[in-house]
Amino acid sequence: MQVSRTSRISLRMATYGVLVAMYLPLVLVVVLSFNSSNSFSWPPRKFTTRWWSTILDVESARHALLTSIKLATLAVLIAVVLGSLLAFALQNFSFYGKNTVSFLAVLPIALPGIVTGVAMRNTFMRFGWDLGLVSVVAGHATFCIVIAYNNVAARLRRMAPNVAEASSDLGATGWQTFRYVTWPLMSGSVVAGGILAFALSFDEVVVTTFTAGSGVETLPQWILNNFSRPNVLPYVTVVATVVMAISLPLAWLAQRLSDGAESLAGR
Amino acid sequence: MTAVAGAARRLTAFFRARPLARLFAVLGAPLTWLVVVYLGSLALLVASAFFKLDEFTGKSNGQLTFSNISAVVTKSAYRSLMLRSVLIAAAVTVLCLVIALPVAFYISRLASRWTKRGLIVAMLLPLWSGYLVKVYALRAMFEPGSEFGSGGFLKSVVGWSPGFGYVAVIFTLTYLWFPYMLLPVYAGLERLPNSLLDASSDLGAGSARTFWSVIMPMLIPSIAAGSIFTFALSLGDYITVKVVGGTAQMIGNIIERVLLAPNQPLAAAFTLWPVGIMLVYLAAMARLGAFKNL
């Protein structure tokens, strides 16, 4: 297709313009974390490292960080096991209701998070179980399954079916084929799915809000709860920068490990 | 060691003879979780909308009623709130599409092989920079300023800011979910064979005609797939609305408020709106071929 020089240049400008627009606000947050003023006004008043050097003294933030890591780790462990099994089952077996099952796997992300959150909260309260770490882990695992599932399923679809056949022709048992052929080929996608699920859980706030009760405060919730306090606001920009510094390299690593950039939008 | 090997061999033999047991061993756990924990919770949620409120506990008291459902369906204030939320989600989806089309076209057809992957990764990475981080980043951009302080970045540098309200909500949601539209549209363009575009121009079509008559019809399933995310994620959002929306309200805000009132049954009735809207939307997008590309 012939594209004129003018449209080529304007399309390039549009693309890089969008890129700038996407990163500008993120850079702004990093800059504001070094701002001596406790507001979002621009330009920054004076450069300071005060918020960075004292962030560890903010006990609630430290505590929230630990809670977030603990929660994401537990949710990811459940989600990776269940999501990988699901992908494996849908790829290797044909059974009645297969389409329904694959639709069911994407439903937790196709329905708004608030629905999942309210539903989980309702279930826990109905059975008289306390809201706490367990209910948050259950909620997070539910929407993380899809990410693990998508990553592993994409890899399995791309895997040549004849390697498994060759393995069994050469006398390997089903288990040996899985252990020495299928698993080494799919393990990278399992790890990538796990990393992305971790990043998503680390970042999630809606399902958390409704399932956490009063005892659990994750890092995103800490941001939400402290944003309106002027004397804590600068710390919010520090925490936000820390969140980016953790999540962005993880996401970048995950797309290197998996089959391509597609996995980054795999939810 | 031999005992373990023997057990493993017997286990393999057991599963080889029984395909159903094999299927169950693999599918049992994930299916149980999705059906019992997830679908079970959704079913309980729908059911709880049909019970009366116990004023004392904020939960249902076990007596059946249709008053919650009829309240959220018939009250005109609620209906206009739902309509507004759907319109906002639709506006965000259209805006995402309008931005994604030229960007995806440039990356897929015009960028060099080396910049291509870098660009698509750079476009998708912000998805992982943290939802709240981005929402607050945009709040810092949009800060309209007051007599006490100068405005945020836009106000000070560009001289204009949308302030806090529906416009800021639509901009912010577009910023948040745009990559979900970009990726499927880009992937759809990548699948489009060059020969098809060449054939179109050989037959005399200009680039505008080629775009509307050849490219767009083939992109419909990709656009439908992307729109599921931009639409669903916008429809249920309530935190963006709180942070940059000023006095704006969407479905999520009323669900949160009613739930914490606390009125669990009425909140459950409200969630039936986004569930119903999304089921209709998913069915429509499935007809457009969205799930072939998910």
Image (tube, coloured by chain):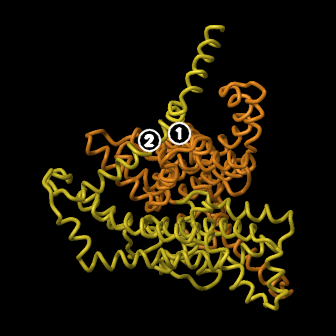
The secondary structure type at the circle numbered 1 is helix
Q: Residue at x 77, y 65 (%)?
A: B119
Chain A on-screen colour: orange
Tag 1 subunit: A
Q: CA distance from mark 1 to mark 2?
A: 8 Å
Amino acid type at circle 2 is: Trp
Chain B on-screen colour: yellow
Q: Is residue A244 above or below residue B200?
A: above
- Horizontally, residue A256 falls left or right of residue A215, namely right
Image quadrant in which the C terminus of chain B is located: bottom right
View extreme (front): residue = B17
Q: Which mark is residue B33?
A: 2
- Looking at the rendered structure, whether the residues under marks 1 and 2 are on a common chain is answered as no
Residue beneath label 1, please? Answer: A82
* Few, some or many residues within 10 Å of mark 1 (<14, 14–19, 20+): many
Amino acid type at circle 1 is: Leu
